[in-house]
Image: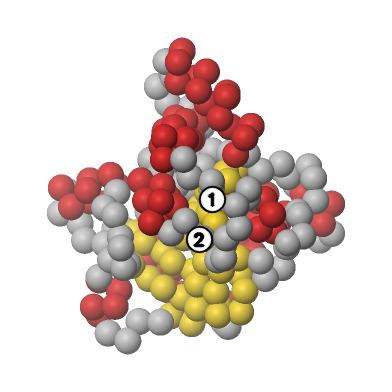
């Protein structure tokens, strides 16, 4: 697939709805003001180097797919100002919440994309990303919907292309079937090495991990979480 074909592809719709409760007038105005300043424009070729997307010099580049309420992304962006973060989220309410937090924190190391993450992945240059975070993705629990799970052979191919050698793919979920699914898909792909040495490695949250609302809900409902780390080989 050529670069032009990748950029022109229609959405693959791994996500569900795009809107929830209507934004209040001031929230909608804030979103309309902030989004253009942080949004990545896929109609233009990726800059060289990619880090020039950001107005401040940074080191590592991380991509978070489906940032939800944005708690993790804004926490990491403030915690690691020398790392650049790209967040993808098609849900308008979540985008408004994150950008409000980014603006309030004055974080200059964040850029966002508000549509299908596969479009952004296909736009990104080869070996341009240090880490991909896929945290509490929609599990599509019904078997007939499993084909819509984001972890797939095709998307792992995308991850493998854009990750640098030894780059990381981090996956967290409280759904056992999705955890097992991801382990099997990564094993069968052959381009990712699971870094766990013992149970504590995947039962213990990532270093500096901020609890998210999804994780809190899982705890309330009696589910534990798994935190998987794979290295791109």
Q: Nearer the viewer, residue 52 or 182?
A: 52
Which corner quadrant holds the N terminus?
bottom right
- Residue 117 as seen in the image, left or right of residue 139: right
Report the coloring of the rendering: secondary structure
- Residue 57 as seen in the image, left or right of residue 226: right
Q: Quadrant of residue 61?
A: bottom right
Where's residue 208, x and y in %? 30, 63
Image disc number at residue 109: 1
Residue shown at the point (66%, 66%) measured from the top left: 128
Q: Earlier in the sequence, mark 2 or mark 1?
A: 2
Which corner quadrant holds the C terminus?
bottom right
Q: Are marks 2 and 1 in contact (CB under 8 Å)?
A: yes
Q: Is residue 135 above or below residue 217?
A: below
C-alpha distance separating marks 2 and 1 = 8 Å
Q: Residues within 10 Å of mark 2 (few under 14, many from 20)?
A: some
Residue shown at the point (22%, 46%) measured from the top left: 217
Q: Is residue 147 visible?
A: no
Q: Nearer the viewer, residue 33 or 96?
A: 33
The residue indicated by pointer 2 is 82
Where's residue 134, x and y in %? 45, 58
Q: Residue furthest bottom?
A: 197
* Total tally of numbered discs in the picture: 2
């Amino acid at each position: 697939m050529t670069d032009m074909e990748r950029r022109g592809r229609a959405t693959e719709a791994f996500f569900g709805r795009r809107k929830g409760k209507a934004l209040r007038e001031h929230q909608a105005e804030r979103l309309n003001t902030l989004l253009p300043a942080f949004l990545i424009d896929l109609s233009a070729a990726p800059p060289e180097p990619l880090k020039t997307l950001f107005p401040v010099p940074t080191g590592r580049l991380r991509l978070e797919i489906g940032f939800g309420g944005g708690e993790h992304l804004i926490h990491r962006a403030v915690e690691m100002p020398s790392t650049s973060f790209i967040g993808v989220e098609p849900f308008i309410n979540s985008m408004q919440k994150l950008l409000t937090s980014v603006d309030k924190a004055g974080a200059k190391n964040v850029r966002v994309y508000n549509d299908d993450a596969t479009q952004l992945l296909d736009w990104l240059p080869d070996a341009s990303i240090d880490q991909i975070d896929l945290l509490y993705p929609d599990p599509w629990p019904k078997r007939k919907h499993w084909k819509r799970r984001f972890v797939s052979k095709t998307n792992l191919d995308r991850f493998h292309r854009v990750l640098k050698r030894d780059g990381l793919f981090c996956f967290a979920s409280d759904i056992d079937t999705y955890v097992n699914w991801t382990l099997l898909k990564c094993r069968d792909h052959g381009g990712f090495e699971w870094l766990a040495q013992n149970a504590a490695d995947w039962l213990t949250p990532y270093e500096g991990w901020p609890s998210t609302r999804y994780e809190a809900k899982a705890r309330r409902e009696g589910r534990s979480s798994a935190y998987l780390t794979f290295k791109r080989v």
